[in-house]
Amino acid sequence: MDCRIMVLPSRDPAKLRVVKIPADMEEQEVYRYTTGVIAAVEEADADYEWEDIEDALEQHGFETLEFVLGPTID
């Protein structure tokens, strides 16, 4: 499967998310677009959950991907 992905960072490694970028979206606009969608969710509901952000991103063509985070390097 060939797809473009974006990592949504978090200070807590357990809260990292990986999303598939819509095929019709240019790479240079992805960061700005996703931060706008996330900001709109945060502004609409101060008690938002990840699922609220996930739903908003999916409405705009993004898809959440499952991933395995490897071990920490000491």
Image (cartoon, rainbow, N blue to C red):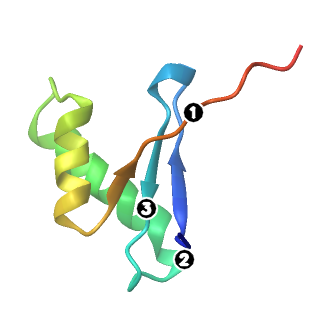
Distance, label 1 to label 2, CA atoms, is: 24 Å
Q: What residue is at 37 percent from the left and 59 percent from the top?
A: 34
Toward which corner of the image does residue 71 lie, by quadrant? top right
Question: Mark 3 = which residue?
Answer: 20
Q: Pointer 1 and pointer 2: residues touching (CB < 8 Å)?
A: no
Secondary structure of the residue carrying tag 3 is strand
Q: Earlier in the sequence, mark 2 or mark 3?
A: 3
> Disc 1 residue type?
Val
Question: Mark 2 = which residue?
Answer: 27
Q: Residues within 10 Å of mark 2 (few under 14, many from 20)?
A: some
Q: Residues within 10 Å of mark 1 (few under 14, many from 20)?
A: few
* Left or right, residue 50 beside residue 9: left
Picture coordinates of residue 52, whole percent (x, y) = 17, 39
> Disc 3 residue type?
Lys
Q: What residue is at 56 percent from the left and 23 percent from the top?
A: 13
Secondary structure of the residue carrying tag 1 is loop
Q: Quadrant of the C terminus?
A: top right
